Image (cartoon, grey):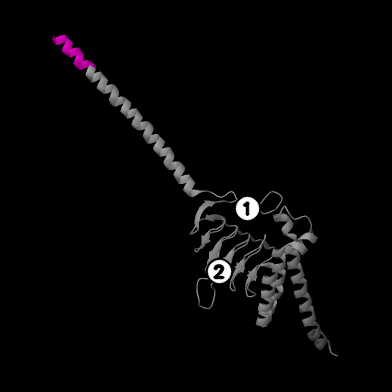
Amino acid sequence: MSEISLHASSAPIIGANEKRAKLLSTVWGDIACVSQRDPAARGMLEVLLLYPGVHALIFHRFAHRLWRAGFKFVGRFVSWFARLVTNIDIHPGATIGERVFIDHGAGVVIGETAIVGDDVTMYHGVTLGGTSWAAGKRHPTLEDGVLIGAGAKILGPITVGARARIGANSVVIEDVPPEMTVVGIPGRIVREERRRGCADGRIDLEHHLIPDPVGDAMAALIDRIDFLEARFSHLQLKVSNAASEAKLVRETNGSAER
């Protein structure tokens, strides 16, 4: 056998081994990142056996490869089985990066053309949904480091910038710039936050520290009303004093005339 034929026959084997190693590395990353983002995780074995978000991602890694290889039905079947087991629905066509963490996971839906970057964290009830029947890109793109609170809905072919935060139960239908915090229905940008990591390299998960723009507006209105009431009381006192002085002057003048 010639040297050329040896190289040709070994190339597919090397390529398959590289892909297998890449898949195992990605799955390991999905498992390892949980301990950094969930204080309830007490060990790798517990995460591997008992975390539905991890199971859903492992199933999706295989289903996605089947889908891209042209085995559409088999990919959809693996996706369906994963949803049956985990209650997390990820279309095999969705592209999901590394070290993604789906906490709790119940009710999470990720559509076919969704793109999820690396180090993304999402909680239960999250939907990455489409808004069109047209073919092509119709689901969101989440860039690296995005955090999505429970129940949030991100709809349409929009982009959520790197390290942005989406508050729980928000409905996002427009692009979100990087580093921003979005809350409400429809979602509105309420704060720019540059700090997204901790000193030990972990992702900042304090997603409960979300501004309350309505509360802030009400507080400003209350302060303004208090100021106006104090000013009104002051003016009332001045008018009352002026009236008393005028009355005293009139009485003094009347006594002098008599």
- Outermost left residue: 258
Is residue 129 visible to the viewer in this orientation of the structure? yes
Q: Is 144 a magenta residue?
A: no
Residue 224 falls left or right of residue 169:
left
Q: Amino acid at mark 2?
A: Gly
Give SS at disc 1. Answer: loop
Which residue lies at the image location 19% right of the left edge and 17% below the top edge? Answer: 250
Residue 117 lies, in percent from the top left, at 63, 65
> SS class of the residue under badge 2?
strand
* Marks 1 and 2, how far apart at CA: 26 Å
Drawn side of residue 158 relative to residue 16, left or right: left
Residue at horizontal 80 percent and vertical 87 percent from the top: 4
Circle 2 residue = 129
Q: Is residue 176 visible?
A: no
Q: Residue beneath label 1, please?
A: 196
**Which corner quadrant of the image does residue 62 belong to?**
bottom right
- Locate the N terminus by quadrant: bottom right
Viewer-nearest residue: 79 or 98: 79
| Above or below, comparing residue 74 to residue 197 in the picture | below
Q: Characterize the magenta stretch by its predominant secondary structure.
A: helix
Percent x, y for residue 94? 62, 72
Name the N-terminal-most of marks 1 and 2: 2
Highlighted range, magenta: 248-258
Q: Residues within 10 Å of mark 1 (few under 14, many from 20)?
A: some
Q: Is residue 249 magenta?
A: yes
Q: Say what amino acid the circle numbered 1 marks.
A: Arg
Front position among marks 1 and 2: 2
Left or right of 26 on screen, residue 152: left
